[in-house]
Image: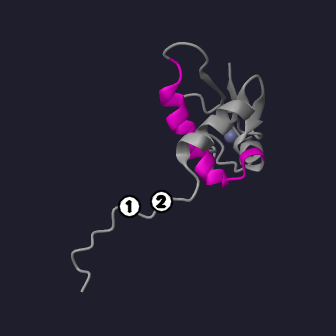
Amino acid sequence: MGSKNKPKQPPVPSDRPETLRREIIFVLEGRTLSAKDISANVGIREKDVYEHLGHIRKSLGRKGPSLLVTPAECKKCGFVFRKRERLRKPSKCPICRGQSITEPLFSIR
Ligand SMILES: [Zn+2]
């Protein structure tokens, strides 16, 4: 019984991504925040912030404001993670293997 009932929707997080992305854009406009700050402002988990930022970076930038990223930096040797395509904070420095790394910062201007 009920085997023909296809679930129409995959398990979706309760918050709609579009609304959340608009909120993230709103909190980032004219401000510079870390993913932790954004997660506190918008009320989502930090790891979800990075995912939304990835989408936001793609959707912005053709015209008008774009997502600016201040790259993470090693506190020990000063190595800057400039080429990093992923937005997430790196866990280890490739030069000195230090694990004390500043958080990347985000802004929309
Ligand atoms: Zn280092």
Identify the residue at image location x=66%, y=43%.
Answer: 96
**From this viewpoint, is residue 77 visible?**
no
**Mark 2 = which residue?**
12
- Is the residue under label 1 in contact with that under label 2 (CB below 8 Å)? yes
**Dominant secondary structure, magenta:** helix
Instruction: Give the magenta-colored segment's residue range.
Output: 41-61
Q: Position of residue 66 (x, y in %)?
A: 59, 20
Residue furthest bottom as drawn: 1
Identify the residue at image location x=52%, y=37%.
Answer: 54
Identify the residue at image location x=56%, y=59%.
Answer: 14
The vertical placement of 49 against 61, above or below, is below
* Quadrant holding the C terminus: top right
Q: Position of residue 99 (x, y in %)?
A: 70, 51
**Count of marks, rendered view:** 2
The vertical placement of 43 against 30, above or below, is below
Q: Which disc, if any, is residue 9?
A: 1
* Quadrant holding the N terminus: bottom left
Amino acid, disc 1? Gln
Q: Position of residue 59 (x, y in %)?
A: 49, 28
Give 28 or 97, whichever is nearer the viewer. 28
Q: Position of residue 74 (x, y in %)?
A: 71, 39
Quarter, ligand 1: top right
Q: Is mark 2 within 8 Å of ligand 1?
A: no
